[in-house]
Image: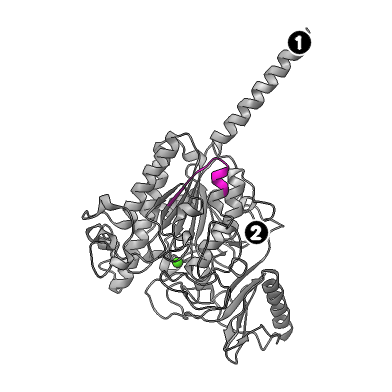
Amino acid sequence: MKSCPLIILLCQLLFLAQSFGSKESNSPNIILFLVDDMGLMDTSVPMLVDNEGKPKRYPLNDWYRTPNMERLAKQGIRFSQFYAQSVCSPTRASIMTGQNSARHRVSQFISPEKRNAGPNGWRWEGLTQNDVTLPSILKQAGYQTIFAGKAHFAPIGHEGEDPTKLGFDINIAGCSFGRPGSYYGEDGYGKLNPKQKKRAVPGLGKYHKTDTFLSEAITLEAKYAIDQSLHKKMPFFLYMSHYAVHSPFHSDPRFADNYKDSGKSKGAQAYATLIEGIDKSLGDLMDHVSSKGVAENTLVLFVGDNGSDAPLGSIHGYSSSAPLRGKKGTYYEGGMRVPFIAGWAKTGKGNSFPVAKGALHNEQIGTVMDLYSTILETAGAKNPSDHVVDGISLLKQLSGKTNPDRPDHFMCHFPHSHRSSYFTSYRKGDWKLIYRYKGKSKYVLYDLSKDPFEKRNLAEDEPEKLKQMTKGMIAQLETENALYPVEGENMLMPILP
Ligand code: CA
């Protein structure tokens, strides 16, 4: 039988048109669930491994209650070695640009009212409309881009303070600062209390004078924005960025009873309620996309923005992030290791790529820079060819495999003063160098394979390794065009041992 070539051609064209049309509507929805100041150990999910590479529980895993993180971890993969910068704004700019903080130069937290101190050229004014940003690319690719919660992209009066100037279609409660005046609806989230007014969370007026906790109000509004996207039949990118668990540590009354007999301090108890509140938000969003029938087509990426700030003890010791050393703002692992859990909101045939189930990935690192490339690949969107990116897509690692192309280094460059000051922390393979620009004792060297909790400084015992690591760090700083700390008129360049 002869077929008419014209009919075959028409059929092919129709098929192509259908597959092209359906590609867009089938683009996965993406929820980037970012928790402020949540460190690796602030969860009941065991995130570290024992000597055999099996998940190992530590006391903090038994202190926190996070059933929905457990649920996501069960249907997805989590990383034991995922790195963020040591404070907020550098990480947030890395997620938006895919670049390391030494390169994008938003290297310190942004002070809302003033130029925070740092070397000339550090981007204290934050992100602008001229920056290539993740949401602006997704928007061009047909996504509805939703911002919800803490933005902290730029100071007051600078264009980047408004997330809609940086590529988001919708802004729920985002502004220039990162610390909310109040978590309580009764306070109008700061607006109704003269002492907190300076840090009043914008919007959310309909929850003022109610008992709706801030994390809950933002979640409810995010669900409403998701519905709008689904109604328009647009895939959505929800940047769900909770103000919690940043200070002030206001106790969330919904969960306070769970901790009241613990014997721990009021602050530690309140912090645990904030953690449980964002855990509920995670569960609510997963339930919501399930109820809308889009859970199998919704990828959830759960992550913290810097090490834990739990009010549990000394800054540079073993407390907030135990057994890891240090906390938010420090150059130890506790300053920059964060939880990362990735999974489909529901596993099934609708998942457009595989994510390993119940897996704990310990073979390789991941970083906050990688989220940019991971989300673009998930969305089928492209990074502009002239935009340099330091991260790499995690999709291969999410499938449970190792990625031979994945770099094995992470650098946190901090030419500023804070809890740990004027340092570069450089991890390469199993080794970690902390270089301190001021003072006499410049080098700290750890072998994380034998000493994961940073107890034994090998800088004097391993001179060759120290030199090799310092050379590697200097090369990386140069590659990323880093700015160096200044002392008086002098720029402090890193020195080889
Ligand atoms: Ca933070």
From this viewpoint, which residue is outermost toward the bottom? Answer: 440
Q: Classify residue 279 by image quadrant.
A: bottom left
**Whether residue 263 can be seen here:** no
Q: What stretch is highlighted in magenta?
A: 137-147
* Sequence-first disc among 1 and 2: 1
Quadrant the N terminus occupies: top right
Q: Is residue 13 left or right of residue 223?
A: right
Q: Is residue 490 left or right of residue 126?
A: right
Total count of labels? 2
Residue 200's disc number: none
The residue indicated by pointer 1 is 3
Relative height, residue 469 to residue 407 (above, below): below
Q: Classify residue 292 by image quadrant.
A: top left
Q: How far across and how far down the image is residue 260, in percent?
A: 25, 67
Relative height, residue 98 to residue 306 (above, below): above
- The amino acid type, in three-letter code, at marker 1 is Ser
From this viewpoint, which residue is outermost toward the top? Answer: 1
The residue indicated by pointer 2 is 389
Mark closer to the observer (1, 2): 2
- The amino acid type, in three-letter code, at marker 2 is Val
Mark 1 Cβ inside 8 Å of ligand 1: no
Q: How far across and how far down the image is residue 257, in percent?
A: 25, 62
Q: Is residue 416 left or right of residue 491?
A: left
Picture residue at 62% right of the left edge, 79% below the top: 484
Q: Is mark 2 on a helix, strand or loop?
A: loop
Picture residue at 41% right of the left edge, 39% below the top: 228
Label 1 Cα neighbours within 10 Å, binned few <14 / some 14-19 / many ≥20: few
Picture residue at 49% right of the left edge, 58% below the top: 303
Q: How far across and how far down the image is residue 273, in percent?
A: 32, 62
Q: Which of 293 and 119 is in front in this view?
A: 119
